[in-house]
Image (cartoon, rainbow, N blue to C red):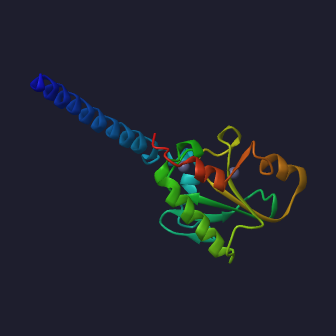
Amino acid sequence: MVARVTFSTVFLLIIVLIYRKKYKKTVQDKYDELNQKHTLKDICMFCSIAANSNKRTLYEDEDMFLVQDVAPRAAVHLLMIPKRHIKNIWALREQDKALLDKMKKNVLKVLKKDNDKELTIGFHNPYFTTINHVHMHIIGGKRSGLRYWLEFGNNFVFKSFTKVHNSLTHKMI
Ligand SMILES: [Zn+2]
Ligand SMILES: [Zn+2]
């Protein structure tokens, strides 16, 4: 009897261990797949800008760069773009929280602000994005009416930094 119980326990333990290892590998594979280097640089506008050494940036480091939005909808309208090709906010995972934090921190430093009060910071709802490379919009000052509202002023098309950041908690796969 004792032998049988021990045998079953050991057997079960082995199964659990194998399964856990397999699951962990799946998570890692999935993450690698989502983050593999973009090979078609010419078709992603932000990847080609990231690769261009003559780009005009307000800030740049090895992970990100900050530019003016070409179609500003407010007095201040900037884009902080990660250099890694990440398709949209759905492709972000918990380990990307640090990247988002750094993106925001560097923007506030450039704008010489202690906090994000008076700023609208966030990301497109992927259904309404025009460029499939994740980018953070930073908007401040006088907003331009209806066009601003349509693109950035409502939760449906535009997700706030905090909302996106919080959604990544425990998001492994
Ligand atoms: Zn890209
Ligand atoms: Zn955009």
The picture quadrant where one finds residue 65 is bottom right
Judged left or right of residue 2, residue 19 is right
Measured as percent of width and height from the top left, residue 33 is found at 41, 41
What is the count of numbered marks? 0
The picture quadrant where one finds residue 1 is top left
Residue farthest to the front?
A: 1
Task: Let me know if residue 114 appears in the view.
Answer: yes
Residue pictured at 49% horizontal, 62% vertical:
63
Residue pictured at 51% horizontal, 69% vertical:
61
The picture quadrant where one finds residue 22 is top left
Judged left or right of residue 85, residue 73 is right
Measured as percent of width and height from the top left, residue 113 is found at 69, 75
Residue farthest to the right?
A: 145
Residue toward you, 137 or 5:
5
Judged left or right of residue 45, residue 62 is left
Task: Let me know if residue 134 appears in the view.
Answer: no
Measured as percent of width and height from the top left, residue 16 is found at 27, 33
Residue farthest to the left?
A: 3
Does 97 sit above or below residue 117?
above
Residue pictured at 39% horizontal, 40% vertical:
27
Measured as percent of width and height from the top left, residue 146 is found at 89, 50
Residue toward you, 169 or 12:
12
